[in-house]
Amino acid sequence: MSAIANSIFSPEAAARFDKLATIYPVKRSALVPMLLYAQDEIGYVSEAAIQEIAKRLDLFDLDVRNVLSYYSMLRTKPAGKYNVQVCTNISCMLRGGYEILDHCKAKLGIGHKQVTADGQFSLEEVECIGACCWAPAMQVNYDFHDDLTTIKVDAILQDYAEGRGKDVK
Amino acid sequence: MADVTITVDGKKVTAPAGTLLIEACKTAGIEIPAFCYYPGLSLQGACRMCVVRQEKNPKLATACTTAIADGQVFFTETPEITQARKATLQLLLGNHPLDCPVCDAGGECELQDMTFKYGAADSFYAEPKNHREEQKWSPVVYFDRPRCILCYRCVRMCGEGMDVFALGIQNRGSSSVIAPNSPAALNPDDLAHVDCEQCGMCIDACPVGALTSGTYRYKTRPWEMNHVATVCTHCGDGCKTTLGVRSTSDGAEIVRGDNRDKSGMNGDFLCNKGRYAFDFANHDDRITTPLVRNAAGKLEAASWEAAFDHIGRKLRMDVDTRGGETIGVIGGNRLTNEEAYLLQKFARTVLKTNNIDHHRTADHVAFAQALAGQSGRTASLRDTLTSKTVLVVGGDPSNQSPATAWNLRTAVRNSGAKLYIANTEDIKLRRQAKAFVKLQPFGYGALAGFLAGDDSAGSSAVNDVEALKTFRETLKAAEGLLILVGSELRGGDLKKLVEFGLSIPDAKFALLSDYVNSRGAADMGLLPDMLPGYTPLGSERFAEYGKASTPGLDMLEMFDAAAAGKLSALYVVGANPVLRYGIDSAALKDTFVVVQEMFMTETAVLADVVLPAANLYEKAGSVTNHYGDLQQVNKAGDRAGVRSDFEMIVRVADKMGAHIPTLIPFGKGLRSDMGQTRGAQSGEADRHAVWLTAQNLEPRLSPFDPMAILDEIQRLVPGYDKVLRLQLLSGNDQHLETDSTLVQIAGQRKDLVLPSGDTLFTSGTLGHYSAMLLDLQANESRRLPVLDQTAAD
């Protein structure tokens, strides 16, 4: 039984959240992981998710929003099915990260934090994703693609567009 | 903790170990600038303005977070520190619009002062400023994002100070922004709002002009006002408030209420009513000319002389032909002590009647009686801040006495006070309580009985009697217990509770009531069966009043008598009994009704003569809050066409042919203070008045001088003989105790207490005429924060 009646999350996620709230010395420490899991499940952190998480952790909605707005990886609006995150931090920048980003922009016809009209792709310029050794790199959902060239990007985007890409959550 | 000595800028400073450096320096007269530091709230270390150099410490340290230890050496003003503060200011000014010439805070802005001091006029930042439009969060709270320097004072003030947690901080870095708890996305108007108590403490704490007040914004500049420290007219706490006053064509308009004078009992605190609800004084519906009912039955404007003449003649005739016992007098809860005293003296000696009453909002008489023979047992509002253990039975201080609630929260937060609460409702203060006892409906009497030792009463007070036993034992063992009693406890119940408290050594009491001078009205004898100071009728002490020792009619009996055609006249001063007690207007058709009022209230419309009255912000005198703390009231606003209740009573008495020097002992006492009787300055009373005012003295030269009546109050009213004039005139509060050796109240009294039931956004009849309170009530119909949530920290 979930700790919350009528949870907006799936039974699995709700069970996971029930446990999360118990494993930290202070309940509210579960806030950031909970927000991240909620985003994975719903695709973004919705108003309903904010309210349920606040209830689960005995916080004000405002507290949840304060934390939520601090992290750029947490979104309050839906992203595309495939969220393309191009790194432009120093290693990637030196190895052509901006070229990759500009290429994605042109290819997908969208800018930073925008979503294509069909909802397939969204694009984000992000800070270091920890793939400096294989720069330039990008991440689609939780899947890494490195040593990129514009040709490689075309192929990757093509794979996703045709449903062959992994949808790692 | 033990004292330690540190060296600051070569000067020895001694303070208890662990004192914050910024506080130790302040005490020693060394100013360290700070934006985020606010005494009494948690430390933030956000603004970096208070940086100082500590010897042997490689980096500059923040004075607001440094606890001092013996032998430390600090430097607070060196070129290095000046440079660091200048750099901090440049950063803070990065997005600041520098719109000081139009900003409300201009002239009293900490950022402005610091920019002047450190001269950060040039900036290295060439980036365009990040501008956002101002936001209206509520009728009283506006937010200008660009002016904000992110000091978090408002966030902490709202959370820690007010226990509301309506403000938070969102986003990150240079895009950080203070955010209210009701986001735009959730509101039908697509604007962010703040769901809170609207106290305005965030505005008060804001060191810049980012948070501004809806009543004051863009109206005037701080230096264009006169600032008058007086007492708020609303609830029973009697907070000191500073009114900003500006001249207008018909008097002086109050444009701002705040508490820049923090010397009052309320310290930093002022609630929404003290801060905004002064606007009734500027209301368009104020009566500014006397109204007399003409032959056609319509109220029409008359001259003061005609109105007084009419009242005087009619009342004289009634006293002479039908007798004083056919005349009723009703006083108000917002009159000054002097006016209340004068009114009852006028009733008892000129109208020859004991038919005098007021709207009682707590049983102050039973309270005085229960404490008969005790001394040192009544608490001051200041005690709520210092007591180690506090029991609150009944009442809802967060709503009815916000300053009390503020003090209790502060005591719990900063001094580890323990708060115990027993209430039939889930009042908000329970969130600070060590233990909360939820009583059954009407369970106060049973609780009082149980606490006083009657175990059988327990089951009608609560469900869990065992828990209540523990509660009782804890209280019995408490040291320095303060017991705050709500108006729900009256008569016998109140006595039982006091009896319980008296069994605990050093326990102190206070009875909470509703309006600024509810206690004063009772103390000054606006009661049919009590003379001032709860002195029994016919007492030798008031021999000069004459011998009448039969109790008069109380409020309800007066209206019954009126309905039966036995009340020849009713004299109402600053009260609205017709609305409050639901009086049928037909009851008063055979009664000559005189009303002294600001507005055409439900009572005033039934009057035969209406006299336009000044309110508490427009006169001088003194008031006693429900704890028994006496404070001076100063005249702030002014309105052409109105007179003080004091003057009107005197004029009516004069028209009745009363001997005025007996009624008002004026023209005595201060002759020697008049100084110059010879030479070039002789006879220039004006100059002497200036001198006297400067010395905080007042000449009692006219029969309209409340100080003359204060002399008599001091001479006759038990308890008030202890008033220290210099304390009063210096604007300090002083705690008075009823001289209980004199209190002799026999037999059962009727329970005539009718609590006003005011909330944060109502204030009796007066509240109906405050546009801002009405606005806030409308605003309140919006969603409220859910109180089953607790804040992150």
Image (cartoon, coloured by chain):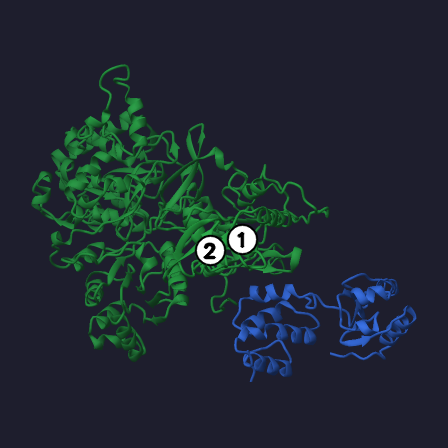
Where's residue A24, x and y in %?
55, 78
Label 2 marks which chain's residue? B
Q: Tell me the residue that label 1 is attached to.
A: B52
Write down the quadrant of residue B567 in the picture.
top left
Pick the residue in front: B288 or A137: A137
Pick the residue in front: B15 or A91: B15
Q: Tell me the residue that label 2 is attached to.
A: B21
User: Which secondary structure, mark 2?
Assistant: helix
Where's residue B274, x and y in %?
41, 47
Task: State the green chain.
Answer: B
User: Which secondary structure, mark 1?
Assistant: strand
Q: Sequence order check: which comes first, mark 1 or mark 2?
A: 2
Please indicate whether residue B793 sits to the left or right of residue A165 in the image: left
Mark 1 crowdedness (10 Å alpha carbons): few <14, some 14-19, many ≥20: many
Write down the quadrant of residue B48 in the picture.
bottom right
Q: What is the three-letter code of the residue carrying label 1?
A: Val
Q: In this view, does A91 lie above or below B696?
A: below
Q: What is the three-letter code of the residue carrying label 2?
A: Leu
Q: In this view, does B735 lie above or below B465?
A: above
Rounded to the nearest angstrom, the CA distance separating label 1 from label 2 is 10 Å
Residue reaching furthest to the bottom: A1
Which mark, residue B10? Answer: none
Q: Which residue is drawn at 68% across and 68% down?
A: A74
Instruction: Indicate the colour of chain A.
Output: blue
